[in-house]
Image (cartoon, helix red, strand yellow):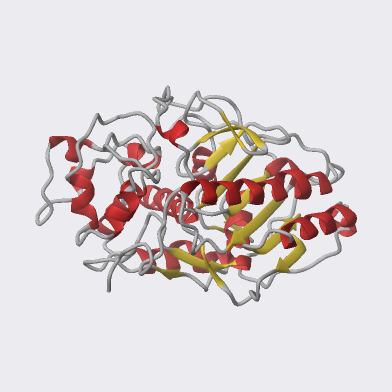
Amino acid sequence: MSRSRRAHPVRRAVWSTRWLARAAAIALGGAVGGACRSTPTGAAPIIVDLTHPWVHASPAALGMDSAALDRAVATAAGIPRFRALLVARHGRIALERYFGGTDTATRFDVRSVTKSVVSLLTGIALAGGALPGLDARVGDYLGPPYVLDDGDRAVTVRELLTMTSGYAWNEAADVDDYDQWIAAPDHVQYLLDRAQTGPPGPFVYNSAAVHLLGVILQRAEREPLPELAAHALLEPAGITSAVWEPLENGTVNGGSGLALTARDLLRIGQLALQDGQSGDRGVVPAAWVREVTTPRFTWRETVGPQPGVTYGYLWWVTDGPPYPAYFAWGFGGQFIYVVPALDLVAVATTEWRGITSDPASEDLALTVLGVIVNDVLPAAHRTVATRVRDPISPP
């Protein structure tokens, strides 16, 4: 089967050429700023057991304005490609709406949201000792039949997490590296054959590099990535709908190949909000959740309605306003958006297939993000418990 754009749906990050051209100042040695910290305003928040079914509650019971949420639904319904909008607060669902014939059973191909899941898996591997640390190198895990040079061998897990591996790469439409990569017979070697400016290099959004991280995890844990993800992360968080895009040699697309139901996407966000805990069980180390959602760069950008956006470890992070937050972001407007100060998670999905240009994808994504930032967040009253996140030491 041809892997052309039409035969094989394109995955390309929502990434403007203006961002790609930026040679960012890197703060890999520690956090820059204090995003995603909040101050307690009430009783301790509940840590829900995510293996249990979601519980719905009225917006009023969760300190939310039902009229404002109705406006969010109306706005979403007016966006032709919008497919799901879910909001959870204090561990219960305040809003769940589906559009375009989708429902609770629909699996959404969420593209680069996959990267944020791989980030959580990396923390589990580090905690379990399968990876010795963030400075573990690609050369420690890859050998024949792959052909590596010294630059390839020197790339670290930290650089893969921060998009600073130094490979020449551009996922914008005028270069189309993602489509060329996905059409390659060997997805790892295709990246290794690229020229490098480092490592470390400047921030360059690179889906192939995150796929490489997934392969490293698979080698380190000696288990296929889907099976590792299922027993180590997803099933302990009650997530059973995962389907991965298969690639060659027993690998899956670790950069953008995961499909999940909207409720399971909400579980990922709630797990992160709860610092990796589900009920009494620690699924992801709390310190790791805080590290991946801490800014790793000095730069900030305004992304549509959201100012103060930068990058952590495969999660986008914002200092706000309106609130410090972090989010997983996939092509065409797939979002898991987490606001610790509001004890809130929002999920949005769209139908991205058939989008044939980066500007169209970016316009859709920014419109969808506007539903969250401009409509959902103002619906939450700051009158009840918030999540408290203590400062952490640099990795």
The residue sitting at 50% across, 48% down in the picture is: 285
Q: How many marks?
A: 0
* Horizontal side of residue 291 vs 94, given as left or right: left
Residue 383 in the image: state x and y as whole percent: 87, 43
Q: Nearer the viewer, residue 132 or 366?
A: 366
- Asked where in the image residue 246 lies, by quadrant, the reply is bottom left
The residue sitting at 70% across, 61% down in the picture is: 86
Q: Where the C terminus falls, by quadrant?
A: top left
- Asked where in the image residue 49 lies, by quadrant, the reply is bottom right
Whether residue 91 is visible: no
Q: Where the N terminus falls, by quadrant?
A: bottom left
- The relative height of residue 385 versus residue 241 in the rendered view (above or below) is above
Residue 67 in the image: state x and y as whole percent: 89, 55
The residue sitting at 47% across, 42% down in the picture is: 15
Residue 365 in the image: state x and y as whole percent: 59, 49
* Horizontal side of residue 349 vs 256, given as left or right: right
Residue 327 in the image: state x and y as whole percent: 58, 46
Q: Nearer the viewer, residue 359 or 240?
A: 359
The residue sitting at 26% across, 37% down in the picture is: 167
Q: Nearer the viewer, residue 108 or 394?
A: 108
- The relative height of residue 182 versus residue 35 in the rendered view (above or below) is below
Whether residue 378 is visible: yes
* Horizontal side of residue 227 vs 114, given as left or right: left
- The relative height of residue 268 versus residue 126 in the rendered view (above or below) is below
- Asked where in the image residue 26 lies, by quadrant, the reply is top left
